[in-house]
Amino acid sequence: LKILHIVGARPNFMKLAPLQRELAHTTHQQKIIHTGQHYDSQMSDIFFEELQITPPDYHLGVGSGSHTEQTAKIMLALEPILRAEKPTCVIVYGDVNSTLAAALVSVKMQIPVVHVEAGLRSRDFTMPEEINRLLTDQISTLLLTPSQDANENLLREGISADKIHCVGNIMIDSLFFALQAIQQFPQKAQKSFELIKKFGEKKYILSTVHRPSNVDDKESLQRLFAFFAEVARENVVILPIHPRTRKQLELNIDISAFPANFHIIEPLGYLDFINLQKNALCVLTDSGGIQEETSVLGVACFTLRKNTERPITLELGTNTLIGDNYELLFQKIQQVKEGKSKKGENIPFWDGQTASRIVNVLERYF
Ligand code: UD1
């Protein structure tokens, strides 16, 4: 087989890494195309290094822009590469703009599209990711899902059962890889070990926020940061800041008056971030992947969104939806401190073996 992986944004890289490693042990050919949707070294390069992903064979360098601009630039740059490479299939990951753009170019050129992390649905069309997920799944040849609920979503949308395979959650393959790397080479996670030492294990709250619904609207952003300031009166809060959020903060909020316990830091690499999650009292986030990682790590996660495309983390994991009900969140944080929080159970197929199941499916199908 000749496989082209197409990735572009931070949450793609930890999904690519295990599959690339697994395929490297076979005779199949593979190449990586990086669209350049994320370009800062802390948003991209560091993940390639830490997860030992081979450098991209092509870099499209599309950068930022409106959704249309970004999608269109990726499509234009990708077409001649696919024409020259003639792959057996293209593999796309997750739900970012790069995912949909790549799937669309490929399907128009009659190149089979394999979607890793298919079938997730929030049913919230104000999220750009929901549009990306839905459309990518409609045009994919093989739909590889992380959990059974995703299969059901796809079947309900009329996708034929023979295209759908529940392979498990590939993010968890990377999570296990990271936990082992942190143990073996603690110096690679030095920043997080220093923070853990300074604040104490299970003594700090870790947070990430970057969803347009939370940070692009000035009023929502101000409410959110007023809440952080309040929480930080009694708790240490660490917030590695996404570039989108930093821009909005600089425009709208004076953070100099915030309590000293509120630590806004640069985005972290993967190993440092996993290590901080593992040792946190709890996590407050609007990310998708972090709902999954905390569930497997057994750390309480409070999701600052009204819905989730990952309901299994509510059912079997440690996740609770909070939306913007900050009053409730104060109570929840108190409960965690009293040792009263969801512990989570094993989620089927979130076992670190997803990449190998994917290779099996690819070999059977193509
Ligand atoms: C994208 C994904 C989102 C994912 C997130 C993880 C889409 C629609 N969204 O959102 O699903 O959860 O990545 O990070 O694809 N920027 C930088 N440096 C970078 C990358 C971005 O400064 O390396 C800035 C851009 O200039 C832009 C903002 O961050 O202003 C947003 O970047 P963009 O890739 O458009 O979307 P994300 O919010 O990162």
Image (cartoon, helix red, strand yellow):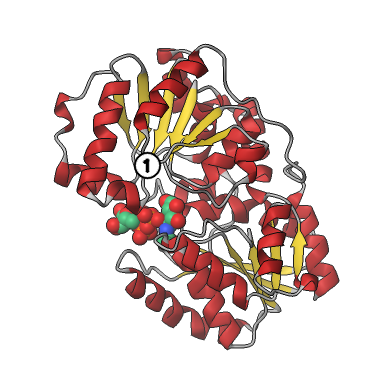
> Where does ligand 1 appear, by image quarter?
bottom left
Q: Is residue 331 left or right of residue 31?
A: left
Question: At 80% from the left edge and 76% from the top edge, which residue is drawn?
Answer: 366
Q: Secondary structure at mark 1?
A: loop
Question: At 67% from the left edge and 32% from the top edge, which residue is drawn?
Answer: 180
Q: Nearer the viewer, residue 328 or 3?
A: 328
Q: Is residue 37 left or right of residue 121?
A: left
Q: Nearer the viewer, residue 3 or 172?
A: 172
Is residue 179 at least partly visible in the picture? Answer: yes
For the N terminus, which image quadrant? Answer: bottom right
Which residue type carries mark 1? Answer: Val
Question: At 62% from the left edge and 27% from the top edge, which residue is drawn?
Answer: 298
Residue 303 higher or lower than 78, as above or below: above
Q: Nearer the viewer, residue 135 or 37?
A: 135
Q: Position of residue 154 (x, y in %)?
A: 67, 66
Q: Position of residue 104 (x, y in %)?
A: 53, 79
Residue 342 higher or lower than 32, as above or below: above
Question: At 35% from the left edge and 45% from the top edge, which residue is drawn?
Answer: 242
Mark 1 surroundings within 10 Å by alpha-carbon count, few (fewer than 14), some (14 through 19), many (20 or more): many
The answer to whether mark 1 is within 8 Å of ligand 1 is no
